[in-house]
Amino acid sequence: MHTCVSCGKTAAAALVDDDGALCHLCYNRHRRPRRLCGRCGQLKRIARNARDGQPDLCDGCYQGPDATCSICSRVRPCASRDEQGQPVCATCYQRHRTGEPCAR
């Protein structure tokens, strides 16, 4: 745990250098590199670097690999992982984050 030099909060550090530590939120906001997305062509933060003939993809264009959601059991792109490391789709992730009950 470090104190972020940008926002002053104590959190896990995304970056520690000679200037101090940055939390993940401040790193993403201020220091994460921006490049042209290979799909939409806009200058944005890159979620997945180019590899195996595939272009750089920004946060908006990148979709995680398909997996069986641990909440709804549907095969969908993985948006996150639960506390046990199991995949969670975007719909269930949003409901879980906002506290909205799942329809299933």
Image (cartoon, rainbow, N blue to C red):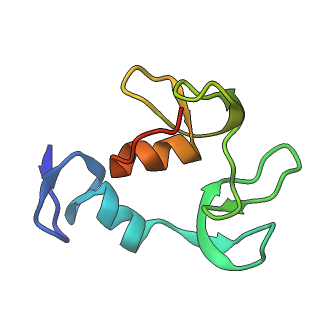
Looking at the rendering, in which quadrant would you find the C terminus? Answer: top right
- Residue extending furthest toward the right: 53
Q: Nearer the viewer, residue 15 or 38?
A: 38
In the rendered view, would you say 60 is above or below 13? Answer: below
Q: In front here: 63 or 70?
A: 70
Placement of 30 over or under 84, stated as above or below:
below
Say whether residue 92 is left or right of residue 101.
Answer: right
Quadrant of the frame with the N terminus: top left
Residue 101 image offset from top left, x and y in percent: 40, 41
Residue 14 vs residue 8: left or right?
A: right
Q: Residue at x 48, y 43 (%)?
A: 93
Q: Residue furthest bottom?
A: 42
Q: Is residue 18 above or below residue 96?
A: below
Extreme residue in the top direction: 84
From what the image shows, is residue 57 above or below residue 63?
Answer: below
Residue displayed at 69% across by 55% down: 62
Tell whether 38 sits left or right of 7: right
Q: Position of residue 97 (x, y in %)?
A: 37, 47
**Frontmost residue, 88 versus 57:** 88
Image coordinates of residue 41 in percent, x first then y, are 77, 77
